[in-house]
Image (cartoon, rainbow, N blue to C red):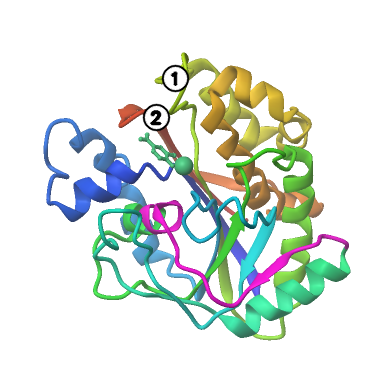
């Protein structure tokens, strides 16, 4: 059977991708950001998964106001890096895992979560920047990736509780797949940031660190925090953090197993307009 071995959580700041693509990662501004992921890149090499289930949000790239799926699973064989206005990032094509993705769709939809099935979709910085942070600049990504897009851009957005419960259903789906795959689940986006309006530039270190503490030790409690608290405390784009609850809900302890092992934690301000947060939790 497939097994979820670890979850990874990280911000997805587009300027991080640009810094890497333009060879600026050693500049004094960016150096501390990339240093926070040095451990993680080695960890990825030492803990290479067969598949990454990557929870992220599309930023009006593949979807627009014409069509706003709350939860969309990418079932295609491949996904092109999107052109977000400056040409596509020079990163590898993302290969999918149609067989596992179709199995997850079947199981999760029968578990009462109404996923949208997406057979063609370009993937934006929400998905490619986390891959770059964790894997560097390889010729090919280390394994297939199942993109799972969550609407946190256009209201109404899903609650943290719904995301957490969805994570549980995803874990059940993955662990009932009849092949011995090592699967990681990644929750991406966040941390506190607001890109527009009078509060543009908002960062809340206290909120972010309390979120990290609670995501690790009391995810059920964190799942009960209403969306408006994220918006008020962490800024309008801080709502991206609910996606981390999907990955956390898929960890073994939530289904009665052992508590996960925290193997890496990193927090840094600033990167562009946002705080960068990052965790790696292993199932034990
Ligand atoms: C920035 C952050 C984001 O999460 C995003 O999607 C776009 C821009 C920023 O900090 O500039
Ligand atoms: Fe974003």
Whether residue 119 is in magenta: the answer is yes
Residue on which the image places disc 2: 274
Residue at 55% x, 80% y: name it: 76
Ligand 1 lies under 8 Å from the Cβ of mark 1: no
Q: Position of residue 187 (x, y in %)?
A: 56, 50
Does 135 sit above or below residue 150? below
Range covered by the magenta-colored residues: 112-129
Mark 2 neighbour class, 10 Å CA radius: few under 14, some 14 to 19, many 20 or more: many
Is residue 17 left or right of 169 when viewed as pictured?
left
Label 2 vs label 1: CA separation? 7 Å
Residue at 12% x, 51% y: name it: 23
Q: Position of residue 70 (x, y in %)?
A: 70, 53
Residue at 78% x, 45% y: name it: 162
Q: Position of residue 255 (x, y in %)?
A: 80, 54
- Which quarter of the figure is the C terminus placed in? bottom right
Q: Is residue 257 visible?
A: no
Mark 1 neighbour class, 10 Å CA radius: few under 14, some 14 to 19, many 20 or more: many
Is residue 84 left or right of 154 when viewed as pictured?
left
Mark 2 vs 1, N-terminal side: 1
Is residue 266 left or right of 20 when viewed as pictured?
right
Q: Position of residue 246 (x, y in %)?
A: 67, 50
Residue at 55% x, 58% y: name it: 63
Does 200 sit above or below residue 160? above
Labels 2 and 1 touching (C-beta < 8 A): yes
Residue on which the image places disc 1: 203
């Amino acid at each position: 059977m497939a097994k979820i071995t670890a979850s990874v959580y990280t911000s997805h700041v587009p300027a991080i991708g640009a810094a890497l693509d333009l060879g600026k990662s050693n500049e004094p501004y960016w150096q501390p950001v990339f240093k926070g992921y040095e451990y993680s890149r080695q960890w990825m090499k030492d803990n290479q998964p067969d598949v990454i289930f990557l929870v992220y949000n599309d930023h009006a790239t593949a979807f627009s106001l014409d069509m706003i799926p709350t939860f969309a699973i990418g079932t295609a064989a491949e996904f092109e890096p999107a052109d977000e206005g400056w040409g596509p990032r020079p990163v590898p094509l993302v290969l999918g895992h149609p067989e596992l993705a179709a199995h997850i769709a079947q199981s999760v939809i029968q578990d009462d979560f109404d996923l949208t099935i997406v057979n063609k979709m370009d993937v934006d910085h929400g998905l490619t920047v986390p891959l770059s942070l964790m894997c560097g600049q390889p010729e090919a990504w280390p394994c297939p990736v199942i993109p799972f897009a969550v609407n946190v851009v256009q209201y109404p957005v899903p609650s943290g509780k719904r995301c957490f419960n969805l994570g549980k259903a995803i874990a059940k789906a993955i662990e009932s797949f009849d092949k011995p795959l090592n699967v990681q689940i990644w929750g991406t986006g966040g941390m506190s940031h607001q890109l527009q309006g009078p509060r543009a530039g908002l960062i809340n270190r206290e909120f972010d660190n309390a979120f990290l503490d609670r995501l690790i030790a009391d995810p059920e409690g964190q799942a009960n925090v209403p969306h408006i608290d994220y918006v008020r405390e962490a800024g309008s784009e801080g709502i991206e953090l609910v996606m981390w609850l999907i990955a956390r809900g898929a960890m073994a302890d939530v289904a009665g197993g052992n508590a996960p092992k925290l193997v890496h934690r990193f927090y840094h301000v600033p990167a562009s307009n946002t705080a960068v947060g990052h965790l790696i939790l292993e199932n034990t």
